[in-house]
Image (cartoon, grey):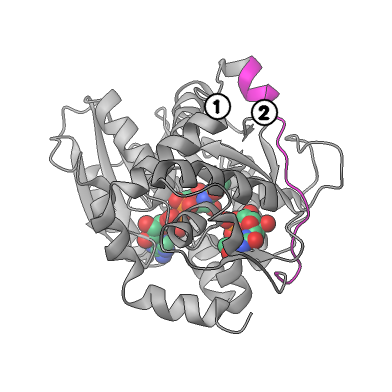
Amino acid sequence: MENFDRKILVTGGAGFIGSHVVRRFLTNYPNYLIVNADKLTYAGNLANLSDVEHLPNYRFEKIDIVDAEAVKGVFNKYGITDVIHLAAESHVDRSIEGPMEFVMTNVVGTVNLLHTAKDAWKGEAHVFHHVSTDEVYGSLGDTGLFTEATPYDPRSPYSASKASSDHFVMAFYHTYHLPVKMSNCSNNYGSHHFPEKLIPLMIHNIQNKKPLPIYGKGDNIRDWLWVVDHASAIDAIFHKGRIGESYNVGGLNEWTNIELVKFLCKVMDEKLGRTTGESESLITYVTDRAGHDKRYAIDASKLEKELGWKPSITFEEGLSKTVDWYLSNHEWVEKVTSGSYQEYYETMYGNR
Ligand code: NAD
Ligand code: TYD
């Protein structure tokens, strides 16, 4: 173990984005030890890593980042040199139902990690990369893009907890000179995405000919990025980004929810051999989300200019690959949509 160049703690590595980050680092950097620390909540699934977990530079630790002793234990056990922090409660609708879990994991858990890193790291080159969201900037009107200079204006319990964690990260940089880096990314989509978020939920419902619940009028806008491109951005920022800086990540790909779902219906009708318009007829408008942010859109020019990052594929290609993955991974879908998912779905959508 001592011979690895870096010993990186990836928190939340069993989640959607975390599993893509773990996969990328394990395969691109065999000289790094990758320690995946994850509580395995409903959103964490070790099956997300079944193709790479055999690799000799991979370790898994089931811990809750809220547990300071457990975090310290993992740091000491492996001599952790760097952190890529993705563990979080991540779903806005769940944060509306119960904000406290979001405060615990996203705020307290982040501060635990910062504190442990500050105590463990003395002088040498280290990186604490905090993965965050564009939702901390609030909601845009019809025009304009979020830049790194946009003032924070979080409006959901989820984004408030992430904004708080971002502030703690920067506070540890300014106060203790902890070598932090931060990224704020737009909405991700891709394989291994838990079907509570818009795109995987719609794929699942289209496949099963269930109603497609569109909140409000469907005119809210999100800016979508393929998860593999987010992982490549994290790689670029982790290695080449400047200490104490934040970088916005996004691919200039805005869609209203209704247009996106209609496009997805078209793609899936073709793949499933259904008649045109068959899936679209499943669209059902439901009660809007409380405090629903109107529009998110990211200006990623700092990342592009400074680090030469850009998305690798178009949305059309990424969505097609994503649908193919869901259609050919029945076992994964079965596993995550049985049990408590059914209760979640009934609670959220039963009387909407
Ligand atoms: P996810 O919900 O799919 O996964 C979260 C992971 O964190 C799970 O594996 C879960 O088990 C783990 N986790 C939760 N609480 C924990 C705790 N207390 N201790 C240890 N592990 C815990 O989330 P995601 O969509 O992969 O998001 C990952 C990160 O990226 C989050 O910080 C999120 O805020 C951020 N982000 C997400 C998006 C997006 O579109 N999904 C966009 C930008 C930023
Ligand atoms: P979501 O995937 O939850 O991401 P976020 O709220 O963090 O952006 O939702 C994306 C958009 O889709 C958002 O405007 C809410 C909307 N939405 C629906 O219309 N129906 C749904 O069932 C879900 C889950 C989301």
Task: Give the quarter of the figure containing the N terminus.
Answer: top left
Q: Quadrant of residue 294?
A: bottom right
10 Å crowding of disc 2: few (<14), some (14-19), many (20+): many
**Residue in the picture at 49% in, 81% down:** 346
Name the foreground residue: 153 vs 123.
153
Is residue 114 visible to the viewer in this orientation of the structure? no
Which residue is disc 1 drawn over? Answer: 314
As drawn, the label of residue 300 is 2
In the displayed structure, would residue 122 be above or below residue 331?
Answer: above
Q: 241 or 173, which lies in front? A: 241
Some atom of ligand 1 lies within 8 Å of the CB belonging to the residue at label 1 = no
What numbered label is drawn on residue 251? none
Q: Which secondary structure lies at badge 2?
A: loop
302 left or right of 34 in image: right
Range of residues picked out in magenta? 289-305
Give the amino acid at mark 1.
Thr
164 over 248 or under it: above or below: below
Is disc 1 placed on a helix, strand or loop? loop
The quarter holding residue 251 reads top right
Sequence-wise first label, 1 or 2:
2
On the image, the x and y values in percent for residue 30 come to 22, 26
* Image spot of residue 64 (x, y percent): 35, 65
Mark 1 and mark 2: Cα distance apart in space: 16 Å
